[in-house]
Image (tube, coloured by chain):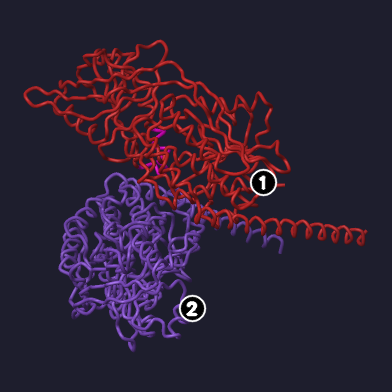
Chain colours: A purple, B red
Amino acid sequence: MHFERLKISFLAIFILAIFSQNSRAQSNTDSIMLRKIYNECMMNSNAYLHLEELCKEVGGRLAGSPQAAQAVDMFEKWGKTIPGVTVTKQPCMVPHWVRGRAEQAIIYRQGTSPIIMHPCALGNSVATPQKGIRAEVVEILRWSQLDSLGKAGKLRDKIVFYDRPMNPTFVDPGEAYGDAVDQRWGGASRAAKYGAVASVIRSVTHAYDAFPHTGVMGYEDSVKRIPAFALSTIDAALLAACVHGNPNLELYLWDECQMLGDVLSYNVIVEMKGTEHPEEIITVGGHLDSWDLAEGAHDDGTGVVQALEVIRIFQQLGIKPKRTIRAVAFMNEENGNRGGKAYAAAAKEKGEKHIAAIESDGGGFTPTGFSCSKGNRYQTALKHRWFGLLTAYGLRDFERDGGGTDISPLGRELNVNLFGLEVDAQRYFDYHHTANDVFENVNQREMNMGAAAMAMLVYLISEDK
Amino acid sequence: MHFERLKISFLAIFILAIFSQNSRAQSNTDSIMLRKIYNECMMNSNAYLHLEELCKEVGGRLAGSPQAAQAVDMFEKWGKTIPGVTVTKQPCMVPHWVRGRAEQAIIYRQGTSPIIMHPCALGNSVATPQKGIRAEVVEILRWSQLDSLGKAGKLRDKIVFYDRPMNPTFVDPGEAYGDAVDQRWGGASRAAKYGAVASVIRSVTHAYDAFPHTGVMGYEDSVKRIPAFALSTIDAALLAACVHGNPNLELYLWDECQMLGDVLSYNVIVEMKGTEHPEEIITVGGHLDSWDLAEGAHDDGTGVVQALEVIRIFQQLGIKPKRTIRAVAFMNEENGNRGGKAYAAAAKEKGEKHIAAIESDGGGFTPTGFSCSKGNRYQTALKHRWFGLLTAYGLRDFERDGGGTDISPLGRELNVNLFGLEVDAQRYFDYHHTANDVFENVNQREMNMGAAAMAMLVYLISEDK
């Protein structure tokens, strides 16, 4: 018995030693390859040149627009410059909302000159009547205030002005955004229920500047559709000061936005076939569309050029991945996510086996780690086996729940392991959905570090046992 | 025996429970206070207004200059607006180097027009002769290359052009800076030993742009002092291309820099007296001087306004610290560290008991943690007792050895526990020592997060048992 146990122990130690040696050898190989990937990206990436081309030659590219179509062609062209990959356009019907000419907002006060502001309509907003809307303004800071004033009939024929700021005491700006963006998304219909004629929000941002921030809003089905605007934080402060001084002042609003019929558009897929398990697919992507006002540099030009850079790095280094890797430029993340839905639907229909999807849609800032979807089977590896490999590159935040809008249907429909690139996001909402989201505000090195991070994670998943 | 052991065990558990309750209670109190400190800073900080005043009303403020004297007055004025503190100017003699009129660099090639570049002299550089220097250029990428060419007599009467870039594959830009800055510091004397008549470096930065970066250089005592210049990375690339195409081209250089006699200047100390251990001093600071070319926003306007903000927060929240807290605006970090040395010398002479010093001199970017000097007695607390309290605010990098130039004499002379505010530093060297280090390139929120981080660490040390 004693002897037997000893034999078993020896065997166990022997097996453990072999296993541990293999595991160490694998870790060494991985470490060397990650360094190669990082260096290739930091020295030879063309992601920044691509970003410049996308921002400056195409610019704003809302789904359904001619610019979005131009961006599809551009991404397809880039993909085709990489040897040994296949490039596919995957069709999807997308909404087609147009802003029209520049919106107007003018403050009228008795006895003084009007004040001209520089608003923007929120995405999906309807137009005002052709002569515009002129009405008194009610500033709203809490939903309970909206409801009590509304029930007292004090919002009838008024313009509701949602002025609750992003909370500066939240450490994570994404959480502060989530806490304030309900005004943008649902404010119009909630005001319309009480008879308001238009809604205006203070832009959802920490920045105090002159840029109005657009972004998607939606209407409830049974409620009258009223136009919805955003003011820059400077204009909002001005309007608030005027309203406090003169509760009877009037605001004039004008826009000519409209929703046209759906349009055919595309996701663009650049695929590098796996050598050992070609049927197992890893998706890495961002979204190609942006708001019309913005060059869409941080949101999300960086995501798509980073995704393509992952494929370029693999090709350049001669890495033959065990699994299939797809860089995907998704269409219509901003106002419908039709591209993300079409991608997941096609995957489901074809019975494809998607093992992981990684999205970059938090801006081209210094990467800090990856968020993971609940139950993500690689989270343990990230926290243990791969931890040291990735912390060497400043990546060590793997705690948060997440993924990305484009890849979320893959999670819902096919239970795919989702990852989101985490970055130092403090200034993301300064630029988000504004004319200030330009190429010049992206730092080349920081964006390349993000691309390298994505390539390293793709490598680890692709080459995993 | 059994019974006795049981009794001891019970006693142990009882003591442990009391201790752990106390410790939990302390941790709860700390947690609440840190949240108050953070909120006060994120909502009411005036650090950004101070920074604007310093950058825009004073601007570049090299030690010994009238602007540096103006900055001393300004910091003193700010300190005096805070009730219940004492403000002291601590004298120190500082070097007084002046740049003179704008430097010149012109490339002359046979048969084509000259190319005018926009160089800057390195700090401490001597002047060229009044008619300038015109000589052939030798590009140097490695020290071994300098030595072999020098020994072969091929650097005699030449201009040595150090063109080794910051290595983009280093994850930490501070390490990449350290790896390349030897060209700036010692390049002139090493070239002069081989008979070179001037030296020019490629600016020490990851950025590819038109800003030349100055910074301190030094001469070896026994070697002829030759003028030392920096070119922007764009100008350096241009010069390199010209040299490769035409090894016999000539470069013209002109400057009129000179080192004048030492000048009286000051550190400014804003002190809040401790209530329980007033003799134990915690210093929090940055440096008030900057290079003459720069507004010194990130380097290091942010450091001094953050340090003062720490005191303002304590005063505003009515925190009566157990230990004495000093916000110190140090003078002459950039080219001599006379302020830091004077502060430590005075502390030593008076037999002061300094228990900790915290410096912010890495720019006003998102804070990530604190570097600690070797043997820092608080490092264990940072990694265990205080860890959860600080990670809640994104602070979790406590691994690196460090402190700061200004406080380093405290470490050397008095063995003080040193800390450096760690930040997301990827873009720091884009701005460092250039005309591009302006107020507009500092993000208000990121800088305030740094001030809050410093205040939280000061609180934890001050209120520690």
Instruction: Bin the neighbour count of mark 1 within 10 Å (Cα to Cα): few under 14, some 14-19, many 20 and up.
Output: many
Decide whether residue B128 is among the magenta residues. no
Mark carried by residue B321: 1
Kind of element beneath mark 1: loop
Residue A173 is drawn in which quadrant? bottom left
Image position of B384 with respect to A91: above or below: above
Q: Is residue A322 visible?
A: no
Residue shown at 28%/66% (left/top)?
Answer: A119
Q: Is residue B175 magenta?
A: yes
The residue range painted magenta reads B169-179
**Residue that badge 2 annotates:** A144
Element marked by disc 2? helix
Q: Residue furthest front?
A: A111
- Look at label 2 and name its amino acid: Ser
The one nearer the camera, A355 or B225, is: B225
Q: Tell me where residue B437 sits by quadrant.
A: top left
Q: Which marked residue is nearer to the observer: mark 2 or mark 1?
A: 2
Instruction: Check the image and report above or below for B108 versus A263.
Output: above
Q: Residue A186 placed where, x, y %? A: 38, 77
Q: Nearer the viewer, residue B54 or B251?
A: B54
**Three-letter residue code for mark 1:** Pro
Would you place residue B444 above or below residue B245 in this image?
A: below
10 Å crowding of disc 2: few (<14), some (14-19), many (20+) = few
Which mark, residue B342? none
Relative to the observer, which residue lies in front, B40 or A428? B40
